[in-house]
Amino acid sequence: MADKEEEKAEGSEMKPWEQHSAVISIPRFDYNAPTSLLHHSFTGFLVTCPIKREKSATKEAMSIFQKFIISSQSCNSEDLESSDRSNEAKRRKVFIAESDEVSVKCVESKSAAVTNADIGEKLSEDSCVPSVEEETDVGVTDVLSLVKLIRSGMLLFIFQKDHSNDVANTVATIMQSLKSGSLKSPLWCHRIFPIQATCTLNEKELTAAVSKLVLQFVNDDKNKLVRPVKFAVGYNRRGFEEAEIKGAKKALNNSDAIDLLDRNRCFTVVAAAVKEVISDSVVDLGSPQLSVLVELLPISRVMSGSLVAGVSVLPYNLVSTKPKLGIKALVSDMKTGNGKKNSKNLVEPK
């Protein structure tokens, strides 16, 4: 009976993500995230991908993040809590750099029951050092959580509350690496939207989030603004289109949230917040110096009557204005795993 089951399993076709499940582990969903997102603001990334390829995209995204997030942490000592922690991280990197040689000695010591006295003095069985890949993977899962969504074709990663990251700069670095060829073009991840802040969808919190991010953008010396400042606003109601909004209105008790599901109302609130910070700002959808993007996040298990939005204020080099305002695609001509152009899946939800 067992032999027949094994033959049946071998004959069945494996999904793309299953082919590598033994090599790359997928993080578990953080089921505490929906409650936390209602009470705290988080930074993170919203990744778009083909429908039914979420697990393949998750592994691909984690591979990208572990390269750019962990490496940037190692290079920027200001992100560490203290100088002691910085020194400890440096010592660990040096130690890991020698892990290939050490791990070989570790395996030999286990198989020979530590018969070599010299090796036994330097390294015990319990002091085996993980490989570079293992150390890096642990670092990413320690700072990023995967949040379960109710819509296909998207992934949501958020940073822990005690962790800060310049998500816009991270995405800019990823795009630059793809352009230069130092990073291999992704197969499954289409776009990575950097979420600089989250808030519940109501006028007070949305205004506060936009005002704070616009002020940070203006005060950043990297952003050279020309007066009057041109800006644009983009709004994605993912999972809440016209038919679904009618059903959502019945479940929502917050009239403010219902109002902000309307695009024009959301644009009015965001534009007012921008003008409050930059009095001489004007709307320009063709060539904005800064773009305020609001993403309605279709998070699973959010308290009934509540909606959560991700907000970012981004420079012109990270956004595209046609056919609509949004984050740039990672690769201009995305293809599926079969090598065919993925024109259908490239259509972003409104």
Image (tube, grey):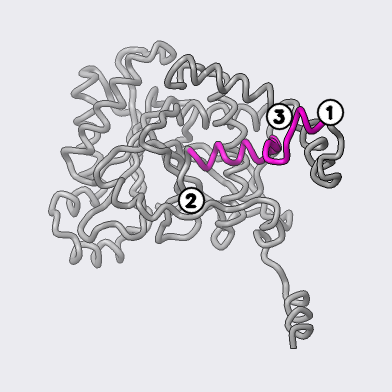
Kind of residue indicated by mark 1 = Asp
Q: Nearer the viewer, mark 1 or mark 3?
A: 1
Question: Which mark identifies residue 118?
Answer: 1
Label 1 or label 3, whichever comes before in sequence order: 1
Check whether the beta carbons of the residues at disc 2 and disc 3 lie within 8 A of each other: no
Q: Is residue 185 left or right of residue 191?
A: right
Residue 68 in magenta stretch: no
In the displayed structure, 223 sits above or below 135; it is above
Which residue is at a point 79% across and 33% down the rendered structure image? Answer: 120
Mark 2 → mark 3, Cα distance in angstroms = 24 Å
Majority secondary structure in the magenta region: helix
Please tell me whether mark 1 sits on a helix, a strand or a loop.
helix
Q: Nearer the viewer, mark 2 or mark 1?
A: 1
Label 2 or label 3, whichever comes before in sequence order: 2
Q: Which residue is mark 2?
A: 155
Residue 137 in magenta stretch: yes
Kind of residue indicated by mark 2 = Leu
